[in-house]
Each structure stands twice: as C-alpha cells, then as structure tokens.
C-alpha cells in the first residue's frame, strides 16, 4: 500500500479495534503508519507497533546506519 494511503487505512483498522500495526522499510509505509497512529490519538501504551529493517542490512551497524 502506498505510504500516502496508509494513514487512512491505519485509522480504519483502529476503528475496528486493531492495536497491532506492522511496517517495514521494504513496505515503504513507515511514515504513513506513524501518521495514522499519531492523528488517530490512540494512547501509545495501547499499541503494539512492529517495524523491520530491510533484508539487505545484515549487520547491526549497517541496519543502524540505514534506519531513516
């Protein structure tokens, strides 16, 4: 799903009761997921958010250097 559409999808999922949101560098939707969570107003302690670094980053140092 394109990053610009993800925020609305996150809000719709939250309306349905979802509290686990998954994202990844490879999905290209991290910013949209974050925007949806921020603008929906769900208290952070009620959420489980997962994000994964791209598969080509095989070491801790490489992953850390390529987070954003």
Image (cartoon, helix red, strand yellow):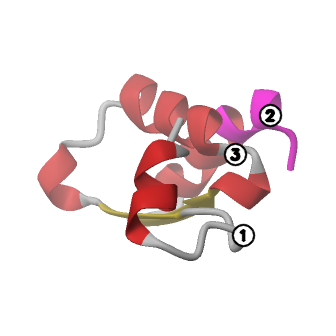
Residue, far left? 45
Q: Are marks 3 and 1 in contact (CB under 8 Å)?
A: no
Alpha-carbon span between mark 1 and mark 2: 26 Å
- Against 12, residue 51 (above or below) is below
At horizontal 40% and vertical 59% (from top left) the residue drawn is 61
Q: Are marks 2 and 3 in contact (CB under 8 Å)?
A: yes
Q: How dense is the environment of label 3, judged by Cα within 10 Å: few (below 14), some, or many (20 and up)?
A: some
Q: Secondary structure at mark 1?
A: loop
The residue wearing badge 2 is 5
Q: Is 3 contained in the magenta span?
A: yes
Q: How dense is the environment of label 1, judged by Cα within 10 Å: few (below 14), some, or many (20 and up)?
A: few
- Measuring from the top left, give residue 40's x and y in whole percent: 42, 31
Main SS of residues in magenta? helix
Q: Is residue 1 left or right of residue 46?
A: right
- The mark that comes first in sequence, 3 or 1, is 3
Q: Is residue 21 left or right of residue 29?
A: left
- In the picture, the disc for residue 37 is none
At horizontal 62% and vertical 59% (from top left) the residue drawn is 24
At horizontal 86% and vertical 40% (from top left) the residue drawn is 2
- Measuring from the top left, give residue 68's x and y in whole percent: 53, 35
The residue wearing badge 3 is 9
Q: Which residues are magenta?
A: 1-7
Alpha-carbon span between mark 3 and mark 1: 28 Å
The residue wearing badge 1 is 56
- Measuring from the top left, give residue 4's x and y in whole percent: 79, 27
């Amino acid at each position: 799903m394109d990053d610009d559409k993800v925020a609305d999808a996150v809000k719709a999922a939250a309306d349905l009761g979802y509290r686990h949101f998954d994202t990844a560098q490879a999905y290209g939707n991290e910013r949209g997921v974050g925007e949806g969570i921020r603008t929906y107003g769900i208290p952070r302690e009620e959420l489980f958010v997962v994000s994964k670094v791209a598969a080509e980053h095989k070491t801790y140092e490489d992953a850390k250097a390529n987070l954003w």
